[in-house]
Image: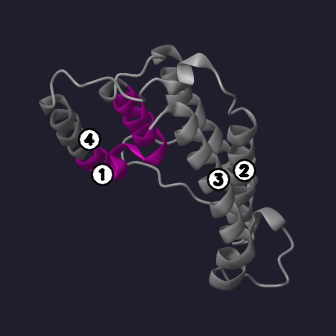
């Protein structure tokens, strides 16, 4: 498969997933009370937001899928060491176990930061600075929103607590 075909399949798949979630999955599988005062706290709000963003990403992929000379190249280069994938898979299992162990000790926010940064370096990201910035900012922004705006309790650790 070439890059253009994969992008076409990804775009169509994202659009199909969006339509499935909006037309069938969310209305029939997620129940919500009709008297919700704050729409952000409704159990259906975030699934609809995710479904909408999935559809937008799918449409974006479809519209940016232009033909170029590099699109006919194979997607993946041949792997020199097939054992490296198994080592990364084992590293991912260790990372998940360590994250699970850290959650009650340092809390969800700090454990998520460490897990995000560790995963970025485990998969050898080409953008380490961006990965580190996102590893710190995304959990902090999510904590700020859910704890202070939505009023949802985020699990804190035994040793470290956020305001």
**Disc 1 marks which residue?**
100
Between residues 81 and 121, which one lies in front from this camera angle?
Answer: 81
Please name which of the two marks, 1 or 4, marks the residue nearer to the observer. 4
Please name which of the two marks, 1 or 2, marks the residue nearer to the observer. 2
Q: CA distance from mark 1 to mark 2?
A: 29 Å
Residue 101 visible here: yes
Please report the bounds of the magenta region as a residue range: 96-120
Q: Of helix, strand and loop, which one carries label 4?
A: helix
**Disc 4 marks which residue?**
92
**Disc 2 marks which residue?**
53
Please name which of the two marks, 1 or 3, marks the residue nearer to the observer. 3
Q: CA distance from mark 1 to mark 4?
A: 12 Å
- Closer to the chain start, of discs 1 and 3, is 3
**Disc 3 marks which residue?**
12
- Closer to the chain start, of discs 1 and 4, is 4
Please name which of the two marks, 3 or 4, marks the residue nearer to the observer. 3
Q: CA distance from mark 3 to mark 4?
A: 29 Å
Q: Of helix, strand and loop, which one carries label 2?
A: helix
Q: Is residue 113 magenta?
A: yes
Left or right placement of residue 131 versus residue 119 in this view? right
Q: Residue at x 64, y 53 (%)?
A: 12
Tell me whether circle 1 and circle 2 mark residues in contact (CB < 8 Å): no
Left or right placement of residue 139 versus residue 76 in this view? right
Does residue 96 sit above or below 19 in this rendering? above
For the N terminus, the image quarter is top left
Tell me whether circle 1 and circle 4 mark residues in contact (CB < 8 Å): no
- Closer to the chain start, of discs 2 and 3, is 3
Q: CA distance from mark 2 to mark 3?
A: 14 Å
Measured from the top left, where is residue 61 in percent x and y?
68, 39
């Amino acid at each position: 498969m070439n890059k253009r075909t994969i992008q076409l399949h990804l775009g169509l798949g994202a659009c199909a997933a969006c339509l499935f979630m909006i037309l069938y999955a969310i209305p029939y599988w997620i129940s919500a009370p009709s008297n919700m005062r704050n729409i952000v706290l409704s159990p259906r709000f975030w699934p609809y937001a995710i479904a909408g963003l999935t559809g937008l990403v799918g449409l974006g992929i479809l519209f940016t899928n232009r033909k170029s000379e590099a699109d006919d190249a194979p997607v993946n280069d041949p792997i020199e060491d097939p054992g490296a994938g198994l080592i990364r898979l084992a590293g991912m299992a260790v990372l998940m176990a360590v994250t699970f162990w850290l959650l009650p000790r340092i809390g969800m926010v700090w454990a998520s930061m460490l897990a995000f940064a560790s995963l970025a370096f485990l998969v050898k990201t080409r953008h380490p600075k961006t990965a580190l910035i996102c590893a710190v900012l995304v959990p902090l922004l999510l904590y700020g929103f859910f704890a202070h705006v939505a009023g949802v309790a985020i699990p804190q650790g035994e040793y470290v607590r956020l305001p």
